[in-house]
Image (cartoon, rainbow, N blue to C red):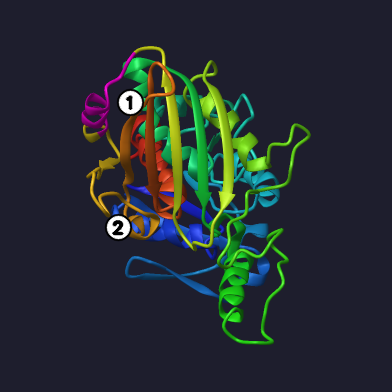
Amino acid sequence: MGYRLAVAGATTDVGREILNILAEREFPADEVAALGPRRSLGTETSFGDETLKIRDIENFDFTGYDIALFAMEAEEARKYAPLATGQGCVVIDASTAFRLEPSVPLVVPEVNPGAIAGYRERMIIASPETTTSELMVALNPLHERARIRRVVASTYQSVLTAGKKGMDELWNQTKGMYVPGQEVEPSIFPRQLAFNVIPQVGEFMEDGASRAEWQIKAEVKKILDPAIRVSVTCVRVPVFVGDAESVNVEFEDFLDEDEARDILRESPGLLVIDKREDGGYVTPIEAAGDFATFVSRIRQDSTVENGLNLWITCDSLRKGSALNLVQIAELLGRDYLQKG
């Protein structure tokens, strides 16, 4: 006997990818319901060889469903997640709605799978920011070996988290650069993104950090270790899918770059591609379509006593978002719900 699943936000990029990954990994589901807003009624989406019709989340009865994977905006998640949990369904949420609430576990399966046990208090499990997810997969095994004191990260983030409107703006701006009179002024982003980079992801906070920078810092502390000092600069880049990070790490103990490379090679969810030659690294375009988080450019940092520099990238739609939710669902089913 398998599970009954609901995918809320099934028409979004993340929702469609969740359905793809559930089918690819042969999640033991007897039934999958694809949910969306009322305006999506009548549309269809794919689940493996099946075609699912979108059902109205507003009137959906979650009674009897085991797990709901939410790929919706935070405001929608706050509205509909309590309806699902109130009817006995565990929610795994991709939005910012619940990530930093103390009673909600924030989980990266390769890093803190045991935190899933805390779902019982609220019946909700949160998945972190896409850039936090890839950062945690890479840093956790190094933290276990040498204890991290400080992390300084610059993120290079695709337009995926800005949704379809953000992707459309980048596409139209890029086309407009070649056609006189068809230039597109920025409306989703604060500056032109085509052929440019923007040192802002999210609105600014009182201390000068952007919302994304504040979010990543808080998530690192919640998932990995509250004692770690974190400094982040988030940059939006003209890439459709795929995030990358340049990371400087300071440890309590010395960690040789060769040992670090060996540790990362043996760690779950990671692939090390680190050749000291032209092209001996992975970029977001090579990571597209892959489940792994890639680590390259591993080298000692001579400016601090115990420092390393890393380059990290992954497919933000697959690993950063959708896969993380599916992996949480797999662990939840196997270790806690134990159905079938």
Residue, disc 1: 141
The residues colored magenta run: 254-264
Secondary element type, mark 1 = helix
Judging by the rendered image, the residue that carries numbered circle 2 is: 24
**Left/right of residue 199 with respect to residue 220 in the rendered view:** right
* Residue 127 shows in the view: no
- Label 2: which secondary element: helix
Left or right: 149 with respect to 80?
left
Viewer-proximal residue among 45 and 177: 177
Q: What's the distance in space between the residues labelled 1 and 2, CA to CA?
A: 27 Å
Q: Position of residue 122 (x, y in %)?
A: 60, 30
State whether the magenta stretch is mostly helix, strand or loop.
Answer: helix
Whole-percent x, y for residue 318 in the image:
40, 53
Among numbered discs 1 and 2, the one appearing first in the sequence: 2
Residue found farthest to the top: 253
Residue 216, above or below 249: below
Quadrant in which residue 143 is drawn: top left
* Residue 210 rendering spot, x and y as whole percentages: 68, 41
Q: Residue at x 67, y 41 (%)?
A: 211
> What is the count of numbered marks?
2
Identify the amino acid type marked 2.
Glu
Say which amino acid is labelled 1: Pro
